[in-house]
Structure formats: structure tokens, C-alpha cells
Amino acid sequence: MSGPWWATLRRELTLIWRSPADMVQPLFFFMVVVSLFPLGLSPKPELLALVAPGVVWVAALLAVMLSLDGLFRRDQESGALDQMLTAPVVSVLPVSAKLLAHWLLTGLPLALMAPLLGYMMQLPVPALATLTYSVLLGTPTLTVIGAIGAALTVGLNRGGILLALLILPLYVPVLVFGAGVVRAAVDGSPTQGLLAVLGALLALALSLGPLAVAMGLRISAGD
Amino acid sequence: MSSDSLRLTVRQLQCERDERVLFRDLAFQARAGEIWQITGANGAGKTTLLRILVGLHGFYEGQVRWHSPLAPDLLYLGHQPGVREELTARENLRFSAALNNQPGDVDAALDAVDLYGFEDVPAAHLSAGQKRRVALARLWLAPKKVWVLDEPYTAIDQSGVARLDQRIRDAAGNGTLVLYTSHHRVGDDVRRLHLGTEAPA
């Protein structure tokens, strides 16, 4: 395959593969934060099960945010970003390939790790599947929203704080519904409705997000 | 497909940066097959002008128009070579070729810029001049109607300069409009556009 979209996806996966530290860091962060909670709180199973949905979700959210700062930075510094914006293809194409690659190597592993950490946090086994689904549905939304912030702050030297300020408010709905659906599963309430809301957020992010990211990159390039 | 079907018209172009006027009332018309050298002191706005022309910089007054049946078939090489250090020379070139719909023999293009034997070396291990050559190798892939090159001669050695001169003249001969910034003159028939204050008469 040699189309621009495939070429970008292949390039991104190669890039992350060549510097695995970038990929491992958010996963390590996720694991460490969740494992420290039982040590800091108390190892009582009832207490852990009570806070588990929130803890796992907050840690996953921060892990995604941590990985976003560098999403466009090196491409911008090396001039590759200008190449993508001046290429004769709509910039949504390379941008969406970049986002997919980022999610495949951040969000997807987070979703695969989530049930393990949930089990460690004494979540009842039936709720673990719901936890995985919710992280699976929620992390792509987090990636896309975060990428909008990363695109707008790519020209700034220390954009990390501004990035967090920009995107955290937009992360709140995902966190509320993500942790909420896991809590509902723990209580034995129906979860389909809340999962559907997460899916709706994802559909919104996927349909408008890449456009917003491409526009943000253009604005940053214009400075 | 006549060679003069493409034109670039710039009228009353003005650009400010940090409350300083870079250029004002800039006007020129460039046609297919011409070579334009843009000169000016450091900070005169050469890079900004090229970024305006390729649509990367939107904060300007005036008019920039590409008269062409379609959007200009553009090849832009920026101030930074756009080469990622984690990727090899071949991977970098293959990606830009695919991104720009520029088919062509990637290995032959790398040979043409004297990178034979360096195809599989990660760009991190290449010198500044070699990285620039990886970017320049795109000029040896499928032809484009417009080349916009920002300081293409930076860090290139003498034989490379001669070869690049030849390549630019050949492309112009085949109807490519070339705009570049540099203090190096490609040939005698090059049009010059000087930015900044002219020397007092």
C-alpha cells in the first residue's frame, strides 16, 4: 500500500517502534499510579472496590494526556509537519492516520491492561468486561480531543500546562461516563445506556476531531 | 498542457511580524519555466514570503494567486529538511514520496544526491548536509509544476551545488516554476527578487 494514509500510518508505527520509551511511559505511569493506591489508602477490598472505577479511569486519562504533548512536536521541529500541510492531499488524511497510530499504541494497550489493574483493585469479575469496554470506547475520544490541544500548542516552547488547561475540561464528560458505567456495573445496574453515551462521544470526536486537529496545525504553522 | 498555463501573481503583498513591516507593496508575476531567486538580509522575510506562497502562513495583506487549472502541483522544501532522525534515508524519502503522490525510484533518487550506501542508515547518523540531501532527493522523483525551495544550498558541498544547479535548470527547462531563497545564483537567466530596503541611489 502506498497511498498517503497508509504511508503515514506505517511511518507512525515505525517511529513509535523505534523509540519504544515514548510508548512505554504512559503504560508504566498507568500501572504505577493504580498500584500505589492500595498502598496509600488501605488494602481493604470493600474500600478498593468502591474507589476502583474512579482511580483506574483517572489514571488512564492522565496517561493519555501525558503521551500527547509530543504527538506533533518532533514533526514540527524537524519540518515534517510543514511537509504534511503542503502535501497535495487534504491534511485530515495524514492527521487521522497519526491519531489511529497513537491510539493503537497507547489507548489500546491501556484498555488491555485495565481489567488486570481493575482485578487488582478488587473490582468484581463481571464488572471487568465493562471496564475494558469503557476504556476501549473512551480512550480514542481522549486521543482525538487531546490532539486538538496538542495541535494548537505545538508551536509553543512549554505547551504542556496550556495543553492540560485546554483539554481537561473537555475530558470531564468522558471521565464521568467512563467511571460511571463501571460503577453501574459494580452495582449491577444496566450499563448499555452509559456505554452508548461513550460511543456517542466517540462518534462526535471521530467525525469532527480530525478536522479540528488539521485546522489547529494550520493555525500553529501560520505563526 | 502548454507550459505557460501556470502563473503566480502577487499584488501589494504586505506582511508584518512583531510590529515590524517585513515587506510592503511587493508585486511580481512568475510564469512556468522561470527561476526566481529571492534575496535579502537575514530577517528580511524570505522564509515568510515562501511560507505565504505555499499557504502555510496566513497573516498577510494583499493578493497571492496561482493561475492554474487546479491547485498548484507544489513541492515545498522548508528551512528544516523535514527528515525524522529515527527513520532511515529510504524510509524518509519513501514517506514524502507517498504523501506527495510523487512516484519514482526512491533508490535512484538517493543515488542522484550521492547517498548511495546510506539508504538504510538512520538519519540520526547522517550529517547536516546529508540530511538536507535526503530532502533534496525529492527533486529527483516525479516532476512537479512548482518548486518552492527555502535555502536548498545550505550545508551542501561543491559537487552537490553543481548538481543541484543542473537539476534546477533542467526542471525549469521542462516547464517547472522554481522559486528559491539563497545567495547562490543558479544561472544567468535567473530573475531576482530582493526583499528589504534597496541600497540608496
Image (spheres, coloured by chain):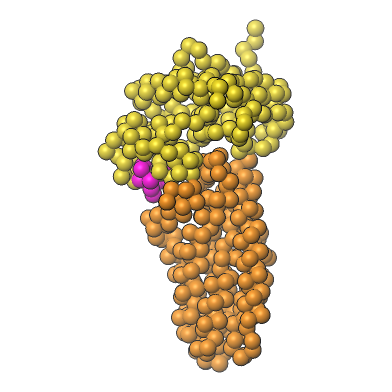
Chain colours: A orange, B yellow
Q: Quadrant of residue A14?
A: bottom left
Residue A67 within the magenta-colored segment of the rendering: no
Give the x, y percent position of residue A121. 50, 85
In the image, residue B19 above or below residue A182: above
Give the x, y percent position of residue A37. 52, 81
Numbered range of the magenta stretch: B83-91
In the image, residue B14 above or below residue A214: above
As drawn, which residue projects farthest toward the top? B201
Q: In which quarter of the image is residue B163?
A: top left
As drawn, which residue projects farthest toward the left? B117
- The residue lying at 54 percent from left, 77 percent from top is A133
Q: Can residue B32 be seen in this view?
A: no
Q: Can residue B191 be seen in this view?
A: yes
- The residue lying at 42 percent from left, 65 percent from top is A24
As drawn, which residue projects farthest toward the front? B1
Q: Quadrant of residue A169?
A: bottom right
Q: Which of the image's four quarters has the C terminus of chain A? A: top right
- The residue lying at 45 percent from left, 19 percent from top is B169
In the image, residue B137 above or below residue A81: above
Count up the numbered dots.
0
Residue B87 within the magenta-colored segment of the rendering: yes
Our reading of the magenta stretch's main secondary structure is: loop
